[in-house]
Image: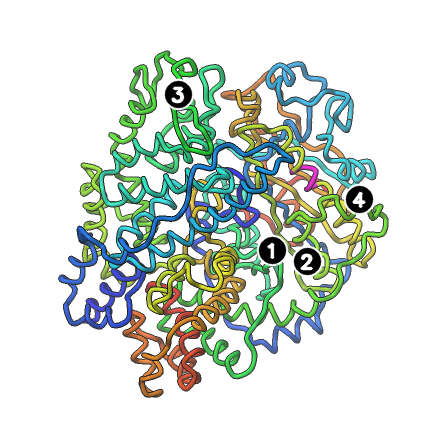
Amino acid sequence: MDTLTRRKFLQLSGAATVGAVAPMLTLDEIAAAAATRPLPLGTPILIMVTLYGGNDGLNTIVPYTDPIYYSSRPDISYAPEKVLKLDDQLGLNPAMTGIKSMWDQKKVAIVRGVGYPRPDHSHFTSMAIWQSGAPVSRLNSGWLGRWVESQELDPMLAISLGSVLPPLLVGEKRSGSVLPLGGLVIPTGAFGKDCQKLSQVVSTDNKLMAAAATSMRDLFTVSSTVTPILKMPAPVADDLPTANGGNAGGDSNLSQQLDVVAKLIAAGSPTRVWSVSLGGFDTHANEANAQAALLGTVSAALTRFASQMKNTTRGKDIVTMVYSEFGRRVKGNASQGTDHGTAGPVFLIGDRVKGGFYGDQPSLSKLIGGDLAVTSDFRDIYAAVLEDLLKTPAEKVLAGWKSKGQYF
Amino acid sequence: METDRLEIARLYHRFGFGPRPGEFKAALANGLSATKTSLLSVPTDDLAAAQIAEPNITNLGPRPGQNTSALIEFNIALRQQSRDLPTWWLDRMVLSDHALTERMTWFWHGHWATSISKINFAYPMYLQNQTLRKHALGNFKDMSFAMLNDGALQDWLDGGANTVKAPNENLARELMELFLLGVNRYTENDVRELARSLTGYQVEPWSGKVVFNSKRFDANSKTILGSSANFDGPKATALLLSQTDCAKFISERIWFRFISSTNGLPADNALESAFVGRDIKSILLAATDSKILGDVNNSVVKAPVEWFASVARYLKLTPSALKTQAQLLSYLDKLAQVPFNPPNVGGWPTDESWLSSASAQYRLQFAGWLIKQADLSALTAIAPNKRVVWLQDELGVLAFSNRTRIALDGEKNNPVQLLQLAICSPEYVVSA
């Protein structure tokens, strides 16, 4: 798997194919809800950033005093003087300057060694497990899709940027919505009315035909709410130097996705969960430049986004979570890259976050089959997000998981 | 008769790219058995396919250095080739008299999913496509050995970087997980041992030429799936191909793409035993048995390329002649499926993944764009109040629902918009 997936990746295991269909809502209901019920101020908003391909955690949070780190990957390690030091053992990848400055403001929590029991080395299986949030029972729905189902019906509640719905937002009976970068354009006039007739679900529909009809219906509902907002300018990021703001990842797809998110949040969209993504982290070869460029993009895009949101009434409500399906093998391979590994760091960023490290840094001298041991379970993070941000009991969504971290 | 109609519709839409005008009605008259035989037997000659000229896709040689005039020419040629390659293949899907070969080549492309986005040369992708077509309905062993020596696949999965000094597991893992056995039918140690067995290959990226360099090969003994030997690429591949899990996996993949991605392969299926000799034609015959094809629960969504090809086939459009090639590829890109550019080595997703509100929008626009370039005189000649029923047979749809009939009735006097709605209807987008 390579270069992958600015578009959503969807895996072979079929997690994306079980999503079911929301009941009917009329256009008027949706439009009225968006106009009269903007998200109440102070409601936490979650931004999920998925890094597809398996981000190398050891070159993201670098153990710059550990000799085993340097002997394991002589070609692709970062020298101590290069890393952005977070404490006397760990430093950030040199490309992540923006995140470093947010760390200095105590707005970044880094959970170390995150994974799940019996790690899987397949991109598809591992990402399906992360997104399902159910490593033991292997549910076919996504953890945030199940959260959507625990809430009152609202197609605006959880939105993924792109044209394909990630398994993360797929529920058993209802799912989140998707929004392409360019917004949605709907047919108008008599033809538009006939298109809308086509979007009714009827009793003779099987599951897939009902989903096809629903996709047409969602086109009309989401479009009517979102299109006017997308025509507005994005919130400005006036505390960044414009030269940097302009080219600091500004033309990356991630930045474009976050621009749309920023506009919609600023406009009061009743959306509590957003999903954006960046691909290309499968660095089997020539890792150093490729990963640094990608991490630089992530860092710059998130910094710019945070800066944009700071100028709005929603700035304090936003928490961003960054994760990938696995870290990479400790020992480098001969192609200046790394093969698939296990545990990796998860970032939580925002004013509501208690900055600092959480979980133990996996030891390089106690590897399991050449891989890092998992020291934090992602369900602890999901549980905290569900209960402390989304105000929803976590146990049911997470198939009985009971513990949670204290990051907020 | 109703199950005959169901099965005939599924044969056309899943094992071909939909009916040409009049074909579906004729097939109904001929009956299920004759239709199945005709759609599943590849004729020796395909007159229409033979008329499609091979694309002008050549070995461009290595990329010239920065700031040279040769680089500009190279980039222009590469861009043209990268555009010609998918449109040439779409021509074959749409114009061939017999669609099964292209349909199976398309299936195998998604199986051994390799993307030009990393290969960066059209020529090796073209060679791979020829290999897949050659073996599309042949023997899976021959295909697998050929793919082991396929430059694009080796390059895609870092085969050239896999050496005795430091193995790179990329190809080994996907060979087991995605190509031959299926996930979790091997251990992590098997992956590492297989990677050692696959050392020694080197690829010339622009020509796709694969050579074996014994100096880079790990000649020590390896243990894969409990067998120990000095495995090399062909021997290790033969070992994987001989596993019963291989038959199970390919049966699952055929089932997943052609029958249902939600209902799993039943335990008592006839596909696995049909694949005992690894003959692809045999497994297709097992998959199209009436017990499977006549089961109303086994519906699938047409992927964007399949939807496009069946629309173009019905409208008698030639993809490479559409105005313009770039616009065609742009629509497919918006729908997230361009041939030779799968999102990752797992291939494209299925079913609900193609049914977002965004894809509904792009499908409507795409449909309108295609219809404007087509000759609708046959539809126009039908009396308006007979058009909806007529289209149902023309498009090979099992049955339009009341919902769709009502919507189509609203456009019966406007052939362009009537057709636009019909091919965007749930009954056409889904092979029910």
| Same-subunit check for callouts 1 and 4 | yes
Give the label on residue A260, or none.
2
In the displayed structure, does residue A84 sit left or right of residue B393? right
Res A120 seen here? no
How many residues crowd around disc 2 within 10 Å: few (fewer than 14), some, or many (20 or more)?
A: many
Chain name for mark 4: A
Q: Are marks 1 and 2 in contact (CB under 8 Å)?
A: yes
Q: Are marks 2 and 4 in contact (CB under 8 Å)?
A: no
Residue on which disc 3 sits: B193
Find numbered disc 2 in the image and state the secondary structure of the residue it sits on: helix
| Same-subunit check for callouts 2 and 4 | yes
Residue B418 vertical placement versus B426 (above, below):
below
Nearest the viewer among B250 and B316 is: B316
Residue on which disc 1 sits: A161
In the displayed structure, does residue A98 sit left or right of residue B7? right
Mark 1 or mark 2, earlier in chain: 1
- In the rendered image, residue A342, in percent from the top left (x then y), is placed at 54, 30
Find numbered disc 3 in the image and state the secondary structure of the residue it sits on: helix
Q: Amino acid at mark 1?
A: Leu
| Same-subunit check for callouts 3 and 1 | no
Separation of marks 1 and 2 at Cα, in angstroms: 8 Å
Separation of marks 4 and 3 at Cα, in angstroms: 47 Å
| Same-subunit check for callouts 4 and 3 | no
Q: Amino acid at mark 3?
A: Glu
